[in-house]
Amino acid sequence: MSFQIIALDPAPFAPLFGLSDAELAGRHIVRRVADTMPGFPCRVSLADAAIGETLLLLNHEHLPVASPYRAAHAIYVREGAAQAHPEPGEVPEVIARRLISARGYDEAGLMTGADLATGAEVAVLIERLFADPATSYIHLHNARPGCFAARVERA
């Protein structure tokens, strides 16, 4: 079995970069400039921003389900980022270099399983969670800060 890691679509975020800092603040969004590498993982490009790149830090509802697991958390999005399209079975470096919390969900948005992994073990964990036929999709989170990293679907 294979899997596909899905990056966020940049379209909903693009207009936000044209807003002033005051307008962003009114939406609880903060403009940041990357000052370390790695350290600012973009959820659209699935890459860490280079030092000096502009990003937005905003709250994103990544699990808009009608279940107790409905969730939103802070994410970074790089200005002008193109949507990443990793190959099936590929774990981008931005994910592999971090401690990842993987959470499987069924069609009703209820959790089917969860565990932690890093590096090459992320792919193994994804395969293990998808071994449960009830698992419809998986969400990856950066385990330490808890923020959403990417959605994973069966390929």
Image (cartoon, rainbow, N blue to C red):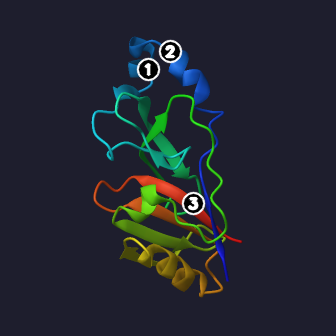
Q: Residues within 10 Å of mark 1 (few under 14, many from 20)?
A: some
> What is the spatial separation of the Cα atoms under label 2 and label 1, in whole angstroms?
6 Å
Q: Residue at left 59%, top 51%?
A: 7
Q: Are marks 2 and 1 in contact (CB under 8 Å)?
A: yes
Residue holding disc 2: 19
Q: Are marks 3 and 2 in contact (CB under 8 Å)?
A: no
Residue 101 higher or lower than 20, as above or below: below
Residue holding disc 3: 151
User: Which structural element holds mark 2?
Assistant: loop
Label whose residue precedes the other's in the sequence (2 or 1): 2
Q: Position of residue 55 (x, y in %)?
A: 43, 31
In this view of the protein, which residue sits in the foreground, 82 or 75? 82
Q: Position of residue 131 (x, y in %)?
A: 60, 87
**Residue 24 got which mark?**
1
| Quarter-of-image position of residue 86 | bottom right
Residue 77 higher or lower than 96, as above or below: above
| Quarter-of-image position of residue 83 | top right
User: Which structural element holds mark 1?
Assistant: helix
- Does residue 105 appear left or right of residue 38 in this picture? right
Q: Residue at left 67%, top 83%?
A: 1
In this view of the protein, which residue sits in the foreground, 153 or 23? 153
